Amino acid sequence: MDYFWPLLMCAALLVGIFTGYPVAMVLAGVGVIFAFLADVPILFLSTGVSRTFSGILSNWLLIAVPLFVFMGLMLEKSGIAQRLLRSLAGLLGPLPGGYAFAVAIIGIVMAASTGIIGASVVLMGVLALPVMLQNRYDPRLATGIIASTGTLGILIPPSIMLVILGDTLRISVGDLFAGAMIPGLLLGALYVVYLIFVAIFRPESMPPLPAGERMPFGRAVIQLIRDLLAPMLLILVVLGSIIAGIATPTEAAALGALGAFLLALVSRQLTWRQFVEVLNETTRTTAMIMFVMIGATIFSVIFRKLGGDTMIADALGVEDAGTNPYWVMFLIMAFVFVLGMFLDWVEITFIVMPIVAPIIAGLDFGLGQEQILLWFAILFAVNLQTSFLTPPFGYALFYIRGIAPPEIGTRVIYRGIIPFVIIQLTALLLTIVYPQLALWLPAKLLG
């Protein structure tokens, strides 16, 4: 068999991942073991070492990762989400589904401010889920909207995933941020449209708040404007400086981290203990990402040496003259979607992207190569957002299960997430059919 070693390497990787052993160690270990089994020259392993030092450890762009993580965690401590939820719920409370609309809007705002999925889902679940259940919301709708809007931070910039994709594909992070803006907002808008349909045709599943819990309209508007001012200003500073070319992603991330820290101080909700917790969590998250990057580098170097990239190209039919490039795109997106049911976005990005990106770049979509890579990166990011929601290992589902009351079972959460996964796939399909959703804004702003 021509592809004996690459196939065996893939099988070993899957077995290693499902054993529960750290993914970074599995990736590096499988790469080194198969280098010896397949009699790869030992000096060839130095390629992985040199890429680790030159492409990861000395990469200034990746400094943005811990800074964006710190920014998101610090904003969580500032109490912005709590204040926004109160003011939005007071404003929208008289409407059917007012609390659900408030959660969706806050999810979009916080996604453009934090990008920390676990923190967003848990925070919104703790704040909103008890109130929604108390007001007789359908548990499936309540858990579904919290989990889905909490994952928008992985797509709407500033997003850690987009920084990683920019480094992996060697394309501008500013382009990626601009390209992800419309698909991310489109996805948030589709969530809101779905809630509107539910409010019209099934109002009993999302009743309005009781009159005694509503806030006077004028007071709610004033409070909302006040509570939105700080996060909007921070978003403008971070994203605006990157897209306008005033600052690099690393410099903008530093501004964002400083701004979030000052907001937490001004809110008087930051304690020394919380500050230490934020530093610890930032260190853990950054270390996890870096170790996976190093392990994936070793794995991909050996995988390509053994013909793995050729195997995947043959499986996709890239060399066949009559193969439709959109069919290849569909197969890759379907493969990534299935992987998202079992793996985290970090592993999928570092394992799959370096292998499939050159294949996609060589296809004819009627676009330039840089445009194809940018478009594909946005499609990849939209697709990977589903990995947080798809059973059996959707992280957002575990977060919701951990904070939901005992009567809300896992089956209820799984059923509640189905329409939102369909909405995500709809947004993915629209971005495939209309590439300008991802390409228009970068071209307009950055040329």
Image (tube, rainbow, N blue to C red):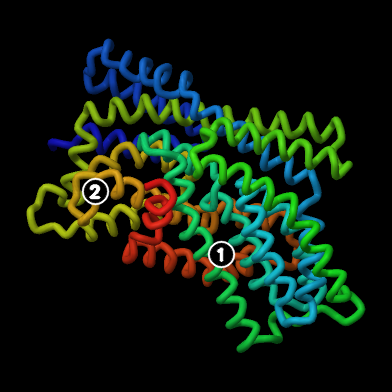
The residue where tag 2 is placed is 368
Identify the residue at the far top of this view. 43
Q: Say whether residue 349 is left or right of residue 3.
A: right
Q: CA distance from mark 2 to mark 1?
A: 29 Å
Across and down, in percent, residue 132 comes to 77, 71
Q: With 388 as the anchor, is 82 left or right in this view?
A: right
Where residue 277 sits in the image (x, y, percent)? 76, 33
One can see residue 205 in this view: yes
Query: Circle 1 is placed at which residue position?
Result: 188
Q: Nearer the viewer, residue 371 or 77?
A: 371
Q: Quadrant of the N terminus?
A: top left
- Return the residue found at the far left: 321
Vertical comparison of 124 with 200: above or below: above
Residue at left offset 92%, top offset 78%: 212
Q: Position of residue 326 (x, y in %)?
A: 23, 60
Mark 2: which amino acid?
A: Gly
Q: Secondary structure at mark 1?
A: helix
Residue 35 as seen in the image, left or right of residue 16: left
- Nearest the eye: 83 or 49: 83
Where residue 95 appears, as percent x and y from the top left, is: 74, 81
Closer to us: 3 or 443: 443
Location of residue 22 with respect to 190 vertically, above or below? above
Q: Amino acid at mark 1?
A: Gly
- Between label 2 and label 1, give the one nearer the viewer: 2
Q: Residue at x 25, y 45 (%)?
A: 369
* Sequence-wise first label, 2 or 1: 1
